[in-house]
Image (cartoon, helix red, strand yellow):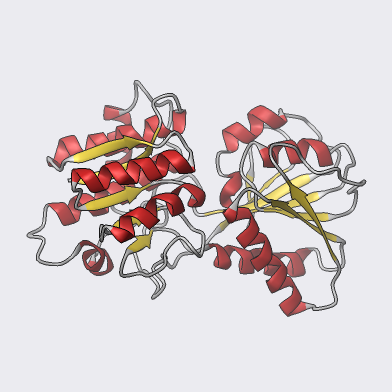
Amino acid sequence: MMGSSDINSGDVSSIGKMCIVQAIGDRTGVDFQVYENHRSQMESALAAQKMVSDGVDLALLPVRSDEASAAIKILENAKIPYLTSATSDSVISSSKDGLSIFPRNSDQAETMANYYFEHFNGRPLSVIVDEGSLYSKQLSDQFIGNIHLHDSTLPINEYRIVGDSLPQLPNMSGRVVFAAIYNPKIALLFRRVREDGNVTILGTDSVGAHREFLRIVGTAADNNGSKIIFLKNWNNQATGPYAKDFKTLVDQSCARRLKEADFGTAFSYDIASLAAEWALSDRSVPPLQAFRQSQRTSIFDGQPFVFSDLGYRKAGYVFYEYSKGDHAIELP
């Protein structure tokens, strides 16, 4: 039996994840037990405790890093292996315990620091940190560390979010702002800085739910010269030998509950498919070892799942820019 966390019956993203996992279970006969976590750390821990008491063979965690960390501590103590989409460096304490289908945050931080020097070297730099988010604090520290590897004398202004309120910011016009924060906070930050104009936000893949971002920001023909450049693991186009199967599942099994496939639906497909592949084998190889040996490819890039020694997938990123209108443009 597989345990899948991060399901919230009232959340659109979670509905898509649940639909895909259940569709793969129905097709393959694999028993996927779904647990609600209500997008919170406490509920994630409770879901993990229920997985332990139910005796699941493998835990699937299509969740944010903060939520995954709460669940993983419990799973590791119970010796239950897990497969996750979380990316914080501290999520996986040992690759013997679990694997992530995405690169770790420090890879993002290095990529974004390099991008700053390639495209904005010389412009004043600020960093926005969410004090309540391990993800934000870790990524911000790693980004600053990578910046100082390039130039140890570069001044960086840090501003910290406490609770739900944005910090009191000075006029940010002309600045580059690194912000590893989730929606809705990153959308609220963009609304704030575009009042100053000519501000560039460098965002990580946490901007991910772009539809939510646009609902908060609102579309505009001109955002006063301000823009957000962010990286993602996906360009929203399924690719490789399993792309058609993914589209078929979405169209045939999820069409009534899901308008279109999104990021969460896509990585849930990859995670559940890997898990089902192992469940249908003779199980002579432990799940994490089987994932490393699998010839299956990801629908994100059509490439095999190759995991680092630390337990994170080795893969590249796609850069996007949002500056006006109602969509983001993929950058070369």
Q: Residue at x 51, y 59 (%)?
A: 88
Question: Would residue 17 be found to the left or right of residue 170 on screen?
Answer: left
Q: Nearer the viewer, residue 90 or 276?
A: 90
Quadrant position of residue 178: bottom right
Q: Residue at x 23, y 64 (%)?
A: 294
Looking at the rendered image, the quarter that the C terminus falls into is: bottom right
Question: Could you tell me if residue 248 is visible in this image?
Answer: no
Quadrant position of residue 77: bottom left
Question: Would residue 83 be found to the left or right of residue 194 on screen?
Answer: left
Question: Would residue 286 be found to the left or right of residue 223 on screen?
Answer: left
Q: Residue at x 40, y 73 (%)?
A: 308
Q: Nearer the viewer, residue 210 or 137?
A: 137
- Position in image of residue 293 (x %, y %): 23, 69
- Position in image of residue 102 (x %, y %): 44, 59
Give the farthest residue toward the left.
282
How many labels were placed on the picture?
0
Quick check: 244 above or below 84?
Answer: above
- Position in image of residue 267 (x %, y %): 39, 47
Question: Could you tell me if residue 105 is visible in this image?
Answer: yes
- Position in image of residue 14 (x %, y %): 41, 33
Quick check: 221 above or below 265?
Answer: above
Q: Residue at x 80, y 78 (%)?
A: 152
Quadrant position of residue 7: top left
